[in-house]
Image (cartoon, rainbow, N blue to C red):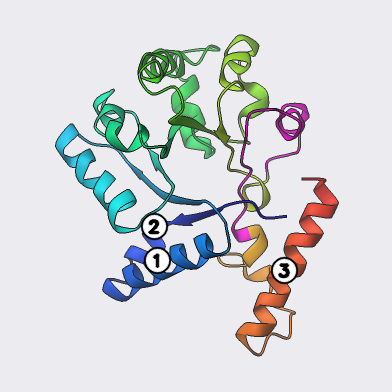
Amino acid sequence: HVVAVKFQSSFFEALGVPGWEALRRAIQKAQGLGLPVIWDAKRGDISSTMEAYGQVCFDQLHADSMTITPYMGSDVITALGSWLEQGRLVYVVFVPSNPSGKYLWEAQGSQPVIAQQVWQMLLDCRQNFPQGLGFVVGATILESLPEELWQEVVQFPLLVPGLGFQGAPLGPRLRQLQTAKVPHLLPMSRGLTGVGDPSLVQNQDLKSWKDYRQWVQQRIEKVSHDSGV
């Protein structure tokens, strides 16, 4: 049921040095199980800083991919070019899943003007790195993307957050991703682990990490069965 792991960096960073060490070990554990790892850090800065982030992600943590934000321009991507050419991947936040993010994309009217401009920049970058770019498109906004833009976006690897806790429905476009030839990822976190959603675990008799691990496994199997994902 699980084909990759996405570690949200901030929750590890918040714990200081021990958290950073836990992240490094968790990445090693996941990769030892044959699972590709995404460092979900959403970094985005000038070239020199992005090169340093690339060193953090790919040379220190040895993750397979990372999430980035494109609002500082194409430098955010081109600075990572040496790693992309080696087969690493970046997921560029294109349309976020949170409500206020959706508002920013649609603030200029019915057509997401900002999204169109960013998309053109991403297409230009992808000519130099045809295998290295994927995009983050929130499941909560997937069904409302203009059809012409959707037909372009779906041709590239997508990371589609918003299922589970954020309440995105399994609409027609999300179902379409399940049968696509391009590899798309549909991440879930709180809806599977109960972290940040105490209602999921409050009536569970979890006395050990083994109990918790078994409960998470049951959650994964249940969600997969109920959703068909």
Residue picked out by circle 2: 9
Q: Secondary structure at mark 1?
A: helix
Of badges 2 and 1, nearer the viewer stands 1
The residue lying toward the viewer, choosing from 95 and 88, is 88
Residue picked out by circle 3: 217
Residue type at mark 2 is Ser
Which residue shows up at 29% across the image and 57% down it?
Answer: 60
Circle 3 packing at 10 Å, graded few (<14), some (14-19), many (20+), is some
Circle 1 packing at 10 Å, graded few (<14), some (14-19), many (20+), is many
Q: Could you say where residue 2 lies in the image, as x and y percent from the top left?
A: 67, 55
Residue type at mark 3 is Gln
Residue extent of the magenta highlight: 168-190
Is there CB contact under 8 Å for labels 2 and 1?
A: yes
Q: Quadrant of the C terminus?
A: top right
Residue type at mark 1 is Leu
Report if residue 112 is visible in the image.
yes
Say above or below: 208 vs 124. below
The image quarter containing residue 205 is: bottom right
Report if residue 94 is visible in the image.
no
Which residue shows up at 71% across the image and 28% down it?
Answer: 180
Q: Secondary structure at mark 3?
A: helix
Residue 170: say if magenta.
yes
Residue picked out by circle 1: 23
Q: Quadrant of the N terminus?
A: bottom right
Which mark, residue 66?
A: none
Q: Real-space Cα distance between discs 2 and 3?
A: 23 Å
Q: Real-space Cα distance between discs 3 and 1?
A: 21 Å
Which residue shows up at 41% across the image and 70% down it?
Answer: 25
Q: Could you say where residue 105 lies in the image, as x and y percent from the top left?
A: 46, 23
Say above or below: 171 vs 108. below
Residue 100: say if magenta.
no
Which residue shows up at 44% across the image and 17% down it?
Answer: 119
